[in-house]
Image (tube, helix red, strand yellow):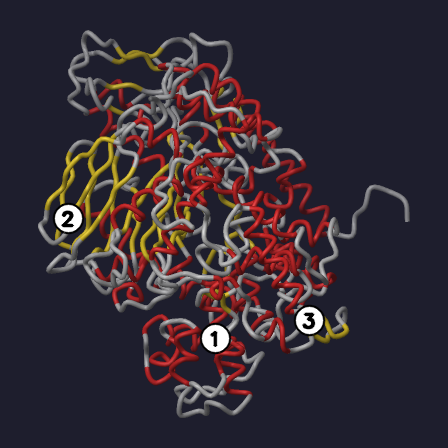
Amino acid sequence: MAATTSRSKEIIHCDPDKCNGCEVCEYVCSWYHGGEINWKRSRIRAVKIEPIYSIAITCRKCDEPVCKSACPRDAISQNAAGVIHIDKDKCNGCGWCVEACEFGVMKLQQDTRLAFCCDYCEDLDGLKCVELCPKEALSYASLDSVGFSSAVEAAASLIADSKVSAGGK
Amino acid sequence: MKGMTGKYLKVDLTEGTVVVADLPEDVAKDYIGGYGLAAWTLYNEVPAGADPLGPDNVICMWVGPCAGTVTPASSKYLVAAKSALTGFIGFGISSGGIGQELRAAGYDGIVVKGKADRPVYIFIDDDTVSIKDAGFVWGKTTWETEDLIRGRHSDEKLRVAAIGPAGEKLVRIANITNDRNRQVGRTGMGAVMGSKNLKAIAIRGTKSVEVADPQGLWDLAREMHTRSMGKATEKYRHYGTPVNVLVHNKLGCLPTRNFQQGTFEGADAVSGERMLATHVKKVTACPACPIGCDHINICQDGPWKGTAASMDYESLELLGPNCGVDDLDALTKAVELCDTLGVDTISAGGTVSWAMEAYEKGLIGKEETNGLDLRFGNAEAMVEAVRCLCLREGKLGELIGDGSAEAARRLGRDSYKFAIVNKDMEWGAYSMRSLQTATLGFATSVRGACYLRSGSYQQDVKGTVDRYSLDESRGKIVSEGEDLYAVIDSAIWCKFTRGVFKGEEEMAEVLNLTTGFDYDVESMIKAGERIHNLAKLFNIKHGASRKDDYPPPRAFEEKMYDDVNDGAIIDRDQYDAALTGYYRSRDWSDEGIPTKRKLAELGLDTSLGV
C-alpha cells in the first residue's frame, strides 16, 4: 500500500543552486540524533560533483519503498506519513536495503553495522537540518509546491527576458 | 584533555615504521594546536643546518582543537617543515575535509621524517595506518591523484592531500592540494613532500569528535553560525576576495607589473564585480563553514573554454595585474595549472612577473623564455610560463622553477633588485610603498613575505596610521597582530571568521568549551606570543638575523608613480626605526634575538637568547 499520495507527500527538498556543500546538515543530524559530532552517522548526505554541483540528499518517502521490499527480514516498515522505520531487533546488517535505495539514503552504522536512515526528526521539535542549513537550501515542502516554485521562477525569467513590464513607462 | 585527542602519528619513511605517540597535556595547552604544535615539533626535531630537501628534515601536519567541531570554518589543518624556499620555518594552512577527518581518525597530527625508497602515500584508516605504494599516481596531477586514491579505496569521501608533478620535481614553490580547490600554498611544502617520495596522505576517520562541553559548544556554535551570515563576512560570501581589486586600485596599492606601480589600467576587467558577472558559476564552502568563499570560475569560450578553477584575490592579483594581465580566462587557466600541477599561485605570479621584467629589461631573451614574448600583459605567454615553471620545462623552467629569488641568483646582473621577496618568498598582493605598516609585517614574518602573520595591512587600509611613512610605534601593531594571529592559526580558525567572534574573550571561551582548559584572554595571547617566539627561535637556529627582516631594494630605491602615487618610497631610516621598534616591542635585542628574560618568561629554551 502506498503510504502517502503524491498530492500531499512532503519531503526534505534541497535546492542545488543554494546548496554550497558546507556539510553543516551532516554535523547537525549527527548531533541531534546521538548527542555527538560524527558526520559519518548523519542521515542526510552532502554530495559534491566537481566542479560546481552540490546537493544534500535524504529519504524521498517513496510510495513503494525498495528498501522495504529488499529487506529479507521484514525489518523495514513505513508509517502513514511515509517515514521509514527500522526494527533494530530484526535487522542483521545484511545491507540489501543500502544496495536497493536509489538515492543512497540507507546507511549502515559504522560500529553496530545496523541499517539506519532519515527519520524526519519525528522525536524532535522540527527538522533540524532544514532549520539550521546556513544557505536555506533545505526546505520541507510538498513536491507540488516545489514544482510550483519552479514554475513561478520560470515564468519570472520569461517576463524578465521579454518586454512585458508590470506597469509604468 | 578534550578537543585534542592526545595522540599523534610518528612516521619514519626510511625505516617504513609508524608509531602512535602521546601528546603531553601541558604541550597541548601551551601551544594550543596547529601552528603552535608545528613550531614545537620543528624546533625540537629538525637539526640546525638540515637540508630542507634531505631526509633529516621533518614535515608535520597538525590540526587544532576546533577541527571537526561545529565551530564555524574550523575544519582546517596546517603543514610545516623547514622550507626549501626560505631555509627557515615553512608552513601553510588549508581547509577542506582533511582537518575534521584526521580528528575523526583519532589523531591530532602526523610527523614524518626520513625518505621512502620509492613513491608512497600514507593511508590513515582510523586505527590502521599504512605506508602504501604510490607508483600508480606518481606523475599524476593533484586532482587525478585524489580521484585515483579514492577509487582504490572505494571511498568517494576519503580525504586526500597530495602533491602534483611540481612537488615531485622538487619545485621549491610547490604546494599541497586537497579537496580539489584547497591548498597548503606557501613556502614550498610540496617540495619537501616530494623530497621524501611522499605523494599523498589519505585519511578516513569514523570516530566521534569529543569536546569538553558538547552542549555548551553546540549552543555557542549555533549562535556563531547565525552571526557568520552577517555583515562581517558578506564580502567573502558574495563577491569573494577579488572584490579587493577595485578597492586596492583606488588606494594605489594594487601591485602592478612586478610592483612597479600601485594602480592598473585593466583593473575593471579583472574586478571581483566583473568576475562574478562573467565567470563565477558556483560559490562553495568547506565542511562546517556557513560562509562559503570559494568562487569557482568557468571559462565560457575561447582557447580555454570549460576550464574550471577556484579564484581568490591573491591568485588573481599576482598572476593578473602584477603580470599586467587583464584576461579572466587566462587567469582561470593559470590557476588551474597551478592547482593541478601543484604550485603556489602567489609565488608563481611573483616569479613570472619577475621574468617579465627581466625580459623587458633585456636581461633575458627568447632563448631563455622558451621562445615566449614574455612582455607584461601577454596573457597567453603568462599561462605558458606558469606551465613551464610548474614542470621545470625548457630553459625558462630551469631558470624560474625555484621561485624568483633563486632565478635572480642564477641570472645575476642585479636582477635580485626586482625579485619582490622577503626571506626569498614572493610578496603577497599588497603594494610595498603605499602600505608601509603592511610592509613591516611582511618583512618581519617568520615564513617570509606574508600578510597573514600579523594582518598589519588593515591599519594602513583603514587609515588609522599614515600608510606612507613609518616610525617606531608601528612595531607594536605588528607584534600584537602576530600574537593574536598565532592563536587563530593554532586553534585553527579561518581568518574570515575574525569578525564573527565578539572579541578575544569569545575566542578563549570557544577554546575552553572545546578543550576543558582554562584560558583567559591574557593566557591565550601569551600562548600566541610563546608560539611566535618559538617560530622565531627556529629561524635563529637556522641562521636568521636582522638582515632577513627587510623588504627588497625596490621599496627603498625606486619611487612609485601611478594614478594615485606621486613618488611613493620607503625611507630607509624610518624603516630601520620601525624594525627596531618591532624588536623592542617584543623584548628582543636590536639584532632581532629574543632576550633570555623573555624566553624564560614564556617557558622556552633560553640557550639561543641574549
Residue A145 shows up from this direction? no
Q: Is mark 1 on a helix, strand or loop?
A: helix
Q: Which amino acid type is shown beneath numbered disc 2? A: Asp
Mark 2 vs mark 3, foreground winner is 3
Q: Which amino acid type is shown beneath numbered disc 3? A: Ile
Q: What is the CA distance from the residue labelled 2 to the residue labelled 1?
A: 36 Å
The 10 Å Cα crowd at callout 3, few under 14, some 14 to 19, many 20 or more, is many
Q: In the image, is residue A16 above or below residue A71? A: below
Q: Which amino acid type is shown beneath numbered disc 1? A: Val
Q: Name the residue under label 2.
A: B12
Question: Residue A61: x and y, percent?
Answer: 39, 20
Tag 1 and tag 3 share a subunit: yes
Chain bearing tag 3 is B
Q: Name the residue under label 3.
A: B569
Tag 2 and tag 3 share a subunit: yes
Marks 1 and 3 in Cβ contact (< 8 Å): no
Asked if residue B101 lies left or right of residue B531, the reply is left
Q: Residue furthest left?
A: B15
Question: Residue B314: x and y, percent?
Answer: 54, 59
N-terminal of the pair, mark 2 or mark 1, is 2
The label number, if any, that marks residue B462 in the structure image: none
Task: Determine the image quadrant of residue A109.
Answer: top left
The 10 Å Cα crowd at callout 2, few under 14, some 14 to 19, many 20 or more, is some
Q: Is mark 2 on a helix, strand or loop?
A: strand
Q: Name the residue under label 1.
A: B352
Chain bearing tag 1 is B
N-terminal of the pair, mark 2 or mark 3, is 2
